[in-house]
Amino acid sequence: MRNYLIIILIIISTLAFSQESRYSSDFEYFIEKLIETHPDPYSGFGGRIEFSREKENTKGRITDSMTSDEFIVLMNQFLSNLNDGHTSLYFAKSENKGRKVFPLQLKISSDKIFVQNTTKDYENLTGSSIVGINNVSIDKWLLKTKSFFPSENISGEYYNLVKIITDHRLAHNFFNCSETLEITFSDNSNEEFSKIIPFQEQVSFLNRKSKIEFDNDNGLLYCSMIGKNHDIGYLAWNSILSREVVENTRKNSPDGLQGNLSWAYSYLNKKQTGNTKEDVLKIPALYEQFYKLSKEMSEKSSKYLIIDLRENSGGMTPIVNPLLYVLYGDRYLNFDFGAEMIRRISPLYLQKIGFGTINDFNQSYRSNLKIGDYLFDRFGNVDPNLSLEQKREMLQSGYNGFGAEYLRKTEPMTGVEIFVLCSPKTFSAAYHFTYFLKRLGRTKIVGVASRQAGNAFMETTNLTLPETGISGSISNSRQVLFKETSQSAKILKPDYEMTWEEFEKYGFDKNAEIIKTLELIENNK
């Protein structure tokens, strides 16, 4: 009997050591790839010595009793020093089956988190702002959020905190709670009160109708004419993605096609059929949609265009370039944004762009670079080596040739006033689109500031940790869009910022930003 107990203890000890060894091995692997891939892995820590110190401190906190989620939290705490929204480890997606749901839907104003929608039981909380959780102020939770999820500015901290509050698994890790959160609210009269809110197996949110509804809302990309006289153009785009991107992937990188389809259908209000050709054709095409919108706007002599990027977390930046030509004509062709994109050459980056070795890359680009070298490029500018006619031809030929038939017959829109709607969810390529429009002129931003910083690390380079299978990403570039001393280097403030009072004014309508913009336009006519 004693021998059996000894054997069992040995097995338990071996398994525990094996678990700790797996995490330690993956930690070292990730650090190696971070140093190899990231444009500047040291400065956020205070230099190379402090990076090494924090690395050893973090490694010492790895234990045999850790869960996978706890390891991810530990790693992201380490990475939070970079202030880099593109470098982190990802929590595995929860299965919908059996997943508990928070019965409040939250929204972020420029100064608060508030309740946008609820189940029937909590209807009276609509519009109430959250000032504390579990008897700790929101400000203190925001500080902790910075070390739980990497972020680039205060909008990112608010965005991540909302994500944590409303996700059962994340809330459990972050708040060290089980099934409930004690929320302290402030109502319209600034009276504070607390309620214990449980996560629930099933919820049914109230169907709160907006003053502005869209019958053609497909979840990804759609256009409409809105306003009292239906003479204001409206484009909603929830990811910088469209059929043109997927068609290009099918033609030039077929191994990535299913990933593109899954990406698109994660937004669309329909499911894949399994028929690839049919599934691709069901994805809305950007240039076709924009052609139809420009035609309607021309027929109604429309002077205003609203571009809604509130739900857009990014995608493929180059697809917006032809739209910029439609909106700004030759002004865009020769415009110098004065911006820079600095990319670091690494094995992961080469793998990402389809090269096996640095020699293959050098041969293709007629360069003489080494692993670890940097590429310094202007950002946003149309290729200065092309003639004016070549630039026009390139931009009218669509996204790598896709969509040209619509772009060539799209009415120029060089005189319209543009309003861009944004929120903390607006990120990466969606931020780029906003930035281009703002810099080129005739554009006002309405909403809450993006969680993307103007001067920041960019471009996800994906990787999977070999021992645990945990996935994540590392930035391979740094963008510099503004002077380092400018406020916009950190946060791009809207021209018309939506405070809690603004949302209250419009009845906490889910489309309050649109209503606000229509009001601005009406007052400007």
Image (tube, rainbow, N blue to C red):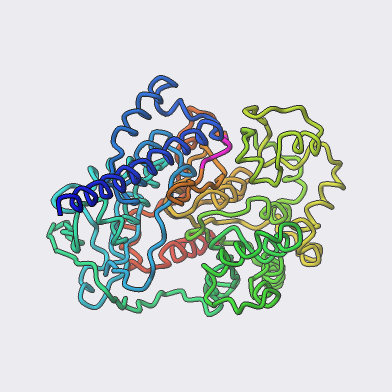
* Picture mark count: 0
> Left or right: 123 with respect to 152?
left
| Rendered residue at 34%/49% (across/down) | 158
Position above or below: 39 against 308:
above
Q: What is the residue that sits farthest to the top in this orientation?
A: 49
Residue 238: give x, y in percent of width and height: 53, 62
> Left or right: 288 with respect to 60?
right
State the quadrant of the C terminus: bottom right
- Magenta stretch prevailing secondary structure: strand
| Rendered residue at 22%/42% (across/down) | 140
Residue 372 can be seen, yes or no: yes
Residue 269: give x, y in percent of width and height: 52, 76
Nearer to me, 9 or 421: 9
Residue 80: give x, y in percent of width and height: 38, 38
Residue 302, magenta (yes or no): no
Figure quadrant of residue 400: bottom right
| Rendered residue at 13%/51% (across/down) | 135
Nearer to me, 324 or 166: 166
Nearer to me, 247 or 111: 247
| Rendered residue at 46%/39% (across/down) | 84
Q: Which residues are magenta?
A: 474-479
Residue 232: give x, y in percent of width and height: 59, 68
Figure quadrant of residue 210: bottom left
State the quadrant of the N terminus: bottom left
